[in-house]
Each structure stands twice: as C-alpha cells, then as structure tokens.
Image (tube, rainbow, N blue to C red):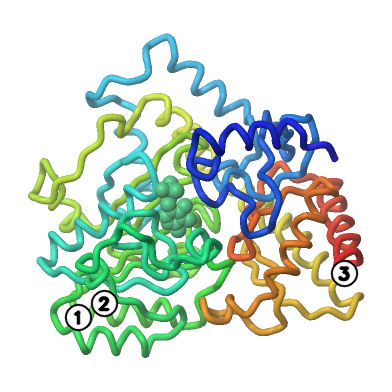
Amino acid sequence: MNHSISKELFEKAQKLIPGGVNSPVRAFKAVGGNPIFIKKAKGAHIYDENDNQYIELINSWGPMILGHANEMIAEAMQKVLADSWSFGAPTRREVEMAELIIEMMPSIEKVRLVNSGTEACLSAVRAARGYTQREKIIKFSGCYHGHADSFLIAAGSGAVTFGTPDSLGVTQGVANDTLIANYNDLNSVQTLVDANENKIAAIIIEPVAGNMGLVLPEKDFLEGLRNICDKNNIVLIFDEVMTGFRLAKGGVQERFGVKADLTTLGKIIGGGLPVGAYGGKTEIMNCIAPAGKVYQAGTLSGNPLAMSAGLAMLNYLNSTPEVYQKLENIGEKITSGIQKINQKMGLSYTLNAVGSMFTLFFTTQKVFDFGSALQCDLALFGKYFQSMLKKGVYLAPSQFESLFLSTALSDENIAQILDAHERSLKEIL
Ligand SMILES: *Cc1c(COP(=O)(O)O)cnc(C)c1O
C-alpha cells in the first residue's frame, strides 16, 4: 500500500502544526508510522490521499453513525446555504434542536447548545459548581471529558497514549479540585465523599467508558453513584458525548435505566459538524446566564449549518428505531466473529462490547478499570493495527480507544473485517 502523499503531507504538517495534527489522537505515535491523510469517504469506506480504500471503524470517533456523506444530512446542510450560515442571533433550528434533545433524552429538561464535547463538559461542571456553591469534583481514572484543565488528570486515551497522564500547563490549584476515583469501585468514591464532606459539587463519569478502551459499568455501579449523589447533594453528570444517541436513542441512561442530573452530549449530535450540548434538571440549568449567574457563552453556538446537520441526524435516529437494532446486529456479527477466530487460534484476549462500540484488548485479564486496561500488550496492538491497516481496515490508532460502528457496514464489509482480523493475528503472533 502506497502512502507517499500522506507521508509528504505529514512532513509538511509537522513544520506548520504541532506534531503535524490538530488533535493528538490522530497521530500514529502509539502504533508507529505516519498518520494517513484522508481525502474523502462514502458510506463504510474512507480513502486516503493515495486513493487507498479502507473500511471505517472509527467514523470520526462516533459522529458518522450512518456512514459517510449521508445524503439526507448533506441535503439538510445545502438548504441552509442560500440563507446564510451564521448570525449570532437566535434561530428556529435551535429551538427545534432543544425540543428534540429533550424528547430523546428523558433526564434533560433544559439544554444549552455549545460547539464541542469539551465545552459541554467544562460548562456542565461550572453549572454544578454554581448550583451547589461547592468547588471540588470527582472524576474517574481513565475517563476523558475533553481537554479543559480540570479534566486533564488521569484522562485516558490521548493522555495515556503519550505517556503524560497529567498535562503541563494545568495548575496545581486546578488539580487540587479534581479528585480521582477508580471506575467500577464505589468504595473509592465513598472514601473521597467522606473525606470531603459538603465540598463536592459534582461527580462526572462516562457511564460507559470509551476512552480507556471500552469499559462497561458493572452491575449496580451507576445506581450506586446515583445513591451517593442523592445522599450528599452532589450533581451527577453523565458524559454521554460518545454514548448519547449511539447505545440507544436516549444513550446509556435509557439502556441502563439510571438518570443523571446533568448530561453532556457531542459527536453524533452534530451529524459530523462541531456541536455539543449540556442539559438536565431545570433547577440547575436555570443557573446558566442569562437566566442565572453561571456565565457560559459562544459566538457560533447553535450555528445554522451545524444545527441543520444535527437536526437531520437526530430526527432520523428518533423516528427510525430500527437503526438501533441494525447497529446491535452489526456489532454482534463483528464481535462474535472476532471471538470465534480468537478461540480457533487458542487466544483468550478480552473483548469488551456493547451495541455498536467495542475494544479488543491484548490481554487475557478482565478489563474493568484503567489499571486493568494498562495490562495490555501495547507493542502487539501496534503490530495488529498496522497489519489491519495494510489489509484495508482503519482502526483507532491506540489500544485505549473504542471502535465505533456505522449502519453503512454491509455483511460483505464484515466478512472482510473478520478475514483481515484472522490474517493479521496469524501474521503478528
Ligand atoms: C470526545 C469526548 C469528549 C470531548 O469532545 P470534543 O468534541 O472532542 O471536545 C468528551 N467526553 C467524551 C466521553 C468524549 O468521548
């Protein structure tokens, strides 16, 4: 496979852009080699600058849940253009978007639209702090909530991949207000809550974690968090930037039946354009300016083009429940196929999966938190990644990521993925 143009572009990019990429997870640092530069995509396939074709298992880290260049979403965006695409003033689509989000996510009573998942999470925490008039938050080791200062502490994939779990530039003062608990370990949460009575504003969590590889909440873990929050007047924030509109129409909260006080959304919500949102209980959301005294703003928030793409996406997901069954089936076919191949080869690697998300961990130990995720054989994963890429399957370039499936994957694509998996294992082991 010829990657000459990607290589040239990357060489140039490294002189112009830090590390040659605009988001660290795009670099191939953890797996070796240069990132491939994408030229275009359609359905289940992406094409690089040298016109190599790959089956897509990242889908822009989630948003392209219907596959690439979906015509319905493209048409919705085209309709906007003649009427101009930014006003910095209220528009009808924002109201429609808010209404739709509230319908799809039952714990959300009021919602504010922003431009990224990062913004959603940092704003939700600010809202919780304003509402409770408390300063500290609890987050979980290995969970990622965007790159705001308070979250860059034990922050999962991007940070771990580069061996800097704590970013330079985050002050000790900020770090002191972020307490770290272990995923699936209620005792670690209770201990922090007991030691910081009436000081904790919020617990923020990925209720299904996708940023240390895919890690599922064990039975009663989310309920346990709900109880601790209720008893101690702590705001429970579910970061559903990845899982919202993916694991079910109403995200993890619908699928696992536990409700958050505040929810953060991103990725799918913009249909591939930059959109985020945070919302929840009216009482808390009414603290946000101009209704209340917690300031949060955005020049491009609710941008017409982004709203049109997001509305087309969410309307479709809301009115087409079959889509979720289809995603389950695709996920089941791929993961059971991988398991079968692994068994046939006498391998018992851990595969965590739910719906259209999964991670194959190169460890035989159970992966239930960040510590157990770190047991993986990263060198072997790197070889596997490269081998899959050569066979035309584009995986996330880090062991500590989930893969994201789209409805565009056909049975033929699935067979190709499984064939590449089997041949890759044979090659690298
Ligand atoms: C991607 C992600 C974010 C950050 O969203 P951006 O749009 O990249 O800022 C936050 N939380 C989770 C769980 C994510 O997966």
Residue that badge 2 annotates: 229
Residue nearest the observer in this picture, 356 or 121: 121
Looking at the image, can residue 66 be seen?
yes
Residue nearest the observer in this picture, 363 or 65: 363
Going by the image, does 123 lie left or right of 60? Answer: left
Tag 2: amino acid: Cys
Going by the image, does 140 lie left or right of 95? Answer: right
Tag 1: amino acid: Asn
The reply to whether the residue tagged 2 has its Cβ within 8 angstroms of ligand 1 is: no
Marks 1/2: CA–CA distance: 5 Å
The residue lying at 53 percent from left, 35 percent from top is 15
Residue 334 position, x and y percent, is 77, 60
Residue that badge 1 annotates: 232
Q: Earlier in the sequence, mark 2 or mark 3?
A: 2
Q: Helix, strand or loop at disc 2?
A: helix
Marks 2/3: CA–CA distance: 43 Å
Residue that badge 3 annotates: 341
Residue 397 position, x and y percent, is 65, 55
Q: Do the CB atoms of the residues marked 1 and 2 lie less than 8 Å apart?
A: yes
